């Protein structure tokens, strides 16, 4: 089965973010252990260029853990 072609920036970001968060866990200072994360993706535009801000939250306690950035 051939993989579907990704056509826009938000699809690219979503795919890459899910690959990253499914491959690893982040340290949660509240839970005191490495935990899977729940990404919150926000696409923004500045000076005609789009970028994505991805905030990562612990799935257990919802503590903010990290921010990732993607630029178009």
Image (spheres, grey):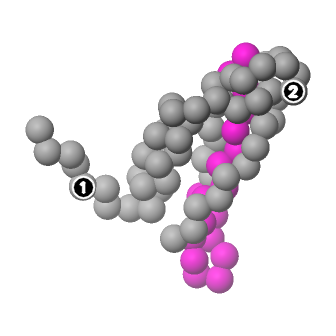
- Residue 29, above or below 6: above
Residue 66's tag is none
- Residue 39, above or below 28: below
Q: Is residue 13 magenta?
A: no
Label 2: element kind: loop
User: Badge 1, how many Cα within 10 Å: few under 14, some, many 20+?
Assistant: few
User: Badge 2, how many Cα within 10 Å: few under 14, some, many 20+?
Assistant: few
What residue is at 69 percent from the left and 23 percent from the top?
Answer: 35
Which residue is nearer to you in this view: 40 or 22?
Answer: 22
Report the span colored magenta.
Answer: 43-60
Q: Quadrant of residue 21?
A: top right
Q: Which residue is mark 1?
A: 5
In terms of secondary structure, what is the magenta stretch mainly? strand
Residue 29's tag is 2
Alpha-carbon distance for marks 2 and 1? Answer: 39 Å
Which residue is nearer to you in this view: 60 or 48?
Answer: 60
Residue 1: image location, x then y, percent = 11, 38
């Amino acid at each position: 089965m051939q993989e579907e072609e990704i056509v826009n920036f938000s699809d690219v970001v979503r795919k890459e973010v899910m690959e990253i968060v499914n491959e690893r866990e982040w340290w949660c200072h509240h839970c005191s252990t490495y935990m899977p994360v729940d990404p919150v993706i926000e696409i923004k535009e500045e000076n005609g260029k789009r970028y994505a801000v991805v905030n990562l939250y612990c799935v257990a306690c919802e503590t903010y853990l990290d921010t990732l950035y993607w630029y178009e």
